[in-house]
Structures are given as C-alpha cells and as structure tokens.
Image (cartoon, rainbow, N blue to C red):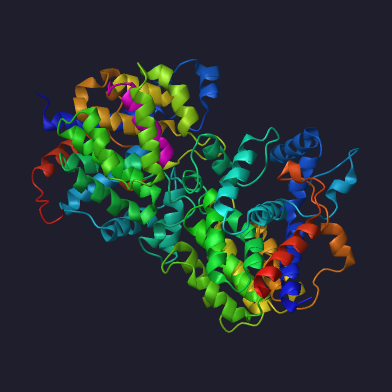
Amino acid sequence: MITLQERARGAFLGLAVGDALGGPTEGKTPEAIAAQWGRVTDFLSPEQGGSDDTEYALFGARLLLEKRRMLTSADMEEAYRSSIINATNAYKGAGFSEVIAINQLIDGRHAPHSGQHVHSWSDGLAMRVAPYGIVATGRPGIAAKLAAADGAVTNAGEGIYSGQAVAAAVAVAMSGGSLEECFRTALQSVPGDSWTYAALERGIRIGSASSEVWSALPLLHRSIACSYYHWTDVAPEAAGLAFGILAASRGVYKDAVLGAVNIGRDTDTIAAVCGAVCGAMHGSGVIPSAWSERITTSRGICIRSVQGMNIRETADRLAVLSGEIDWSSST
Amino acid sequence: MSSNQQRGRNALLGLAMGDSLSWTSMFHRSVLLPPWTRRIRREMDAASESNNVIVTPMPFSLNQPAEHFDLSPALCTEWSAFTAETLLHSGPERFAEELLIQWRELADSPNPVRGYVSTQGALQNIRNGILPPQSGRQHPHYFDDSALLRAVPIGVYCGSDGTLAARLAGLDAAVTNSEDGIWGAQSVAVTVGQLTAGSTIDAAMRQGIAVLPEGSWIRRSVDEAFRITAGASAVVPLIPELQRKIVNREYSYGNVAAETLALAFAIVKLHGSEFNSALSDATAFPKSAESLPSLVGALAGAHSNVPVAGRAWTDSITTLKGIALPAFVGKNYLSIIEEVLQHAENRRTS
C-alpha cells in the first residue's frame, strides 16, 4: 500500500530529479547527445541541479498552500506581479512564454491576453503542473482546471491543453490509477482536434507498440519532434514525447526519465513530466536514492522567492491539503 | 482596361516591389549562390564576438554572378505566385483539392522548397500524413504571416466577393497556419478585394477587420495600432510607439501575423493614397521586414488607380528567381498577374 504522502513525494521529487537529470542534454539532438556521452544513465556532475521546471512548480504549490481553494487566473496574475515582476531577478532562467507574459503584464495587459503571444504553446505550463495533480488526487478535472487557471497568465491554446493533460495524468496516478487510465484521462482533458491530442495519441501509440524504451526513442523523435524549429519548448511535442516514453517504459521510473534525458529537444521538461507521473503512480521509493538525495531545498535561481522551499515538505503539505479542500463548488 | 484591373495589377506589382525592397530579401537572394559564400558570411558574423567589428556582414558574390543581388522579388512573391497558379489551375470550386495536390507535390519534391517555419512545419506534417487543416495546426508557427501574402492574389481574383475571398483564403491559409494566421490571411484577401473593387480605404478595412474575431490576439493588435494612428497624419512620427507596442522584442522572428497586419493597416490607413510614401514607410520597421513591405505594397497598390510600377520596376520584378520554390526559376511574374486579372475580370463581368 503506497501512502498519499509517498505518492506526493514521488510526484514532486520525480519532477525535480527529472528536471535536474535532463539539464545537460536540454536543447540537443539525440545524435549530439550520443556523440558526446554515448547513453546518459546518471547525473553527469556533482553540481547538476534543477531549473525553472521545479521552481515554477514550487511557485504554484506555494500559491495553492496559501489560498487553500481553487485558483483563478487573477490569483496567479497577482502572484506574478508581487513575487516575480517586483523581484530583482524576474527573468532569470525563464522561457519565452514567461518572459513575454511578464512583459505583457508590465505593459498593463491581463490574463488571458497576457498569455496570447508567439510562444503561447510553450511547455512552461506542462512542466510545472504536478502540484495541481497532487492536490487534486483522483480528481483529474480539478487538476486540469487548476492548470488552466495558472496557464492563462503565460500561455494559450496548446500550451494550456498540454498542461491540462499532464495535471490530469498526475491526478489519476496519485489515486493509484494505471498508466492506461492516466493516458485515457489525459486525452479526455484536451480538445479532440488539438495538436496536443494528436501528439499524445501518436506518442502513446508508438510507445505502447514498443517492447522497451530505448528502441522507441528514434521513432518517437521522428514522428513528434519539430526538428526544423530551433526552440525546443514546444508543449505538444514535449507532452507527446513524454507520454510516448511513459508508454514504452510501462511507467518504470528510471527507464522513463533516462529515456527522456536521451531523446533530445526539451529533455529536462520531458523528464520532469515522466518523473512526476511515474513518481505519483509508484511513490517516491522508485526514485534511486542517490538521485533523490540530491534534491532538498530550492536554490531559487529562476524565482528568488521560492529559495529555501523544501521539496519534500511542500509535497507533504500538498498531500495533506488534498484531503482538506472541498472541491464541490469547483466542478 | 477597367480601373478594377489597374488596381488588381497594382496590388500584385506592389507586393513584388515591397518584397524586392525588404532588407531580408537581400539575404534570401544569397541562396542562389554557392553555400561557401553563406558559410564565410556566417563565420564573419561569428568572428564579430572576438574582433569587435560589429558592422553586419552583408551577402556578397565575390567571383560568383553578381546579378543575383539585383533588386528582385523573393520569398513573399514566389509563395504568392504559387497560390495564384494553384487557384488559376483549379478555379474556386476545386481549390481545396488542388491545394492538396500541389502541396503534396512540394512535400515530395526532390528539390526542397524554402520558406517559413509554418511552411516547413506544414510540409513535414504532410509528409507524415497530417493533412489540412491539421497540417497548419500541428507546428509551432500557426500564427506566422506566411499566408497573408498568399492571400493577395486570392483577393484580386475574388474582387468585391468578400465571402468567396475569405473562404478561399481560409482554405489556402489552413494548409500552413491556424487561428490568427488564418484570420489574418482572410482579412488581407477581403481588404485587397474590396480595394480593387473601388472601396475607400476605410470601408475596405472595416470589412477586412470584421473577419478578425473580437478579442483575438490579431484583432487586439490591429485595434491597438489604430489607437496609435488615430488623429495622426503621418507614420514617421509614430514609428517609436508602433514599434514598441506592436512589434515583439523577445522573439527570434518578426513575421507574426498579428504584428504584420496591424502595422500594414496602420501605414495604409495613413498613407494608402500615396503609394510611394506607404512603401517607404513600410521599410522602416526592421524586425517586420520579412513581409511588411510586401503587404503594404499590395494594399496600397490595390487602392491606386494609376500605374505604380514604371519600367525600371517592371524590369526588376518580371522574372522569378526560384529562391523559395526552385521550380519557379525563370517564371514570368507579370504573366501570372495578367492571368489572375483576366479571371477576375471574367468573374466581374459574368
């Protein structure tokens, strides 16, 4: 029997470890990764830590712990204004979607207009939604709604859909759902004619047909990655690759995050998504302790105000909160 | 010749003139030269990090044919000509089927075509069996302005029939784009059509803007540009504000439909009756250079009753170079224009 606390820690630590493990290969092609390292199977340096994925997840988690209710885009916008825009390192480590949205907020625009821009489809939301899946354990609709409220500040369209899919999958995994149930629910939480749906469906199909993760990577990359495009933070692509890897690895934590680290493109986010789903499904015990021991408190590199937040403690508090919020008025 | 024909011709000539003037077209022309010329330019660019010579290395021909750098149409015009030929071949009823045939052919072509992120994304999708409209949705540049210029010949072809113009431009744009990228193209087709039919600039733009959904990114951008130009009589004094409020600073590309259309409408609203001023002002937005001069040339041309291109210009834009579409090398652009005009005239008088 896996406790809720073990699952919550598994989701958050799973995300943070994936984020840290995928850092060195982020933005590279599979060929470049293979040429430099062969196959990456472990951390590559002692100082390798997490990045924006973990810090923005902590940012959302802290807001949830403060509000203790369904979040609105106005809540999130206010948090951006008070904790990020007014901070000295507002943009450090942020991606296009956060930076452009922040600049639009500074220019006096509001959600959802602040999220309509040239990177509205970024994976900046999908990378940070695990806390919503934790707090909405077994309630994927609530998790997706929290993700959409958060995402409307920085993203639009596909960027929000991919966040909804990941949040919903974590919510299902948190309640002991199977990988197939995670996939089905994720697909149900996005529009059927969206790119996100198509990419998730394609990834799941290719991954499920593969006998193990490594042989699935080239086909997943070829079928889903936008190799003609320089920037890699494309949410339908990252979500499609992540779900394909989850399917091919059958939800085995180590196989999934290592597959993600080696597939190229936005590897830290792909690994973070894989890590969050597997960790929620199987609990923190599936994360090799040599890896999870590296994750303690946030260094606050991208968002100064999350510096010092303890990841296990935050996960524990989200697990407790999940039993305390009455979601009946939010469905 | 009717004044409708004159304006239609001017729209398509103006497009090619703007395209020729764009500073980015100078870089596009360099693809006609051997790769080593571009490699050396990139090396010079990279060396600026260490030698502090930051003047921009320009495309050069050295001992290769220098005439490739003569003023000539490039990316926007060739892709517009592609859509024009597709429509001429199929007519409006079979346009969707013909688009699919032509785009599949491009996707499978042994000579790869060059273009925008959206065109390359759409081509990869088509090669993977992902067909329109999903081909225009499943890539990161659904919002770019690649379809806006392809909509110009559609507008000329349809004339005052705005419903048809919007429908055909929607079909064409959906191959490569989605949402704002499609709405912008429809808006261009409708506006160009109304202008060639003799509407005033304000009336034509009203119809063109009505195509843009309320509250959409592109609609808000156009509204913002009009707020800035309200009461003004010239573009130049407004350039800093237009640049700051309409053009993104953060991103690696400037050819964003919401930005290009807003700037083009603002310029044409103020200077649309003076083709030459409008065209020069359109070159004053460096990050928007990819498509803005072409679009302004097309819109201001569509409003002009007197010939916009003299001999020097028609000589420059007659022959396409095959920069984007290798198969178009040597094609006579003026002949394509005349064919579009003939069809437009037949539709108008029938």
As drawn, the residue found furthest toward the bottom would be B231
Residue A326 lies in the magenta stretch = no
Residue B27, percent across and down?
75, 47
- Quadrant in the picture for the N terminus of chain B: bottom right
> Residue at 45% across / 65% down in the picture?
A107
- Residue B62 vs residue B197, the one in the foreground: B197
Relative to residue A199, is residue A278 drawn left or right?
left
Residue A270, percent across and down?
38, 32
Q: Is residue B92 visible?
A: yes
Rendered position, A238 above or below B272: above
Q: How many marks?
A: 0
- Residue A306 vs residue B72, the one in the foreground: B72
> Residue at 47% across / 28% down in the picture?
A221
Magenta range: A236-252
Among the 4 quarters of the image, the one containing residue B60: top right
Residue A248 lies in the magenta stretch = yes
Rendered position, A286 above or below B59: above
- Residue A277 vs residue B178, the one in the foreground: B178
> Residue at 41% across / 52% down in the picture?
A88
> Residue at 25% across / 58% down in the picture?
A72
- Quadrant in the picture for the C terminus of chain B: bottom right
Q: Is residue A310 visible?
A: no
- Residue A215 vs residue A296, the one in the foreground: A215
Q: Main secondary structure of the magenta part?
A: helix
Relative to residue A286, is residue A160 drawn left or right?
right
